[in-house]
Image: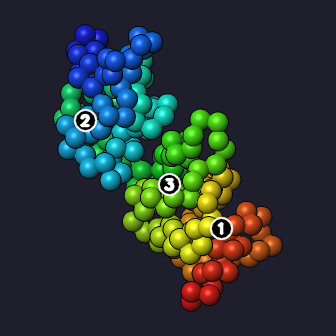
Amino acid sequence: MSESHLEQWFAQYQDFERTDGASVIMPDGFERLCTDLGYDMANIEPLVLMWKLECSELGTVTYDKWESSLKAMHVNNANELRRAIARVLKNMSIEEPVYKQFYQRMFNYLKSDKQKVISAEFAKDILPVIKTQDNLLFDKFVKFLDSDSEKYKTINRDQWQSLLALSKIMDSNLTGYSKEDAWPALFDEFADWVQKQN
C-alpha cells in the first residue's frame, strides 16, 4: 500500500483540531473507524484492534503506529483489516501466549497515566468481554468484586496478571486452591467467597 493511501485512510478519522500538530486518531475517531469496520464497541474486536494498532492509550492511534501496524499485518483496506483482526482473534483462542499478551496489554489501557491500579468498575466491565469461552472463573471474579463494591475498588497489575494465571490452573470453584501458595491476598478472599457460594 502506498504511504499516501495510508495517509488518506488515516485522515478520515484523524483529529484535525489538535493545536500541537500531531497526527493522531482520538477515541471518537477510533469509534468511527470501528463503526465503519462493523464492530460493536461493546465487543472484543475494538480492543483487539487497539492492541494491534499499538494504541498508546484507549482509542488513541498515532500515524506512525497506524502505518507500521498495517504494514506488519499486510493490510491495505478495511476488508483486509477485518480479516486480519479475525485471524488474530482465532489465534488468541488457540495460542495461549498471544492471548496473554493481549490480556496484559488491557491493564495498560484501563489505567490512568500515572496510576498503578485500575478501577474495579473497569475490570468488571471488561473481563466478560475479553474472557475466553471456557473461562468461567472471570465471571465468578466479577460477581465477587460486585459482592462488596465498597471494599473492592481497585485492581493492581499483580492481581490482574494473577487472575489469568489462576484461571489457567483452577476450575471456577477454585478446587485445590491453597492459601499457602503465593497468590495475592485478594484471591484468598475470593476463594473464601467462592466456598461460601457453594
Cα distance in 3D space between marks 3 and 2: 22 Å
What residue sits right under mark 3 in the picture? 122
Whichever of callouts 3 and 2 sits on the residue coming sooner in the sequence is 2
**Left or right of 186 in this view: 75:** left
What residue sits right under mark 1 in the picture? 151
Q: Residue at x 43, y 69 (%)?
A: 134
Give the secondary structure at mark 1: loop
Give the position of the N terminus as an image quadrant.
top left
Residue 184 drawn above or below residue 177? above
Are the residues flagged by discs 1 and 2 in contact, CB closer than 8 Å? no
**Front position in the image: 22 or 130:** 22
Give the position of the C terminus as an image quadrant.
bottom right
- Badge 3 amino acid: Phe
Whichever of callouts 3 and 1 sits on the residue coming sooner in the sequence is 3
Q: Residue at x 45, y 56 (%)?
A: 126
Q: Residue at x 59, y 50 (%)?
A: 118
**Residue 160 on image: x %, y %:** 61, 55
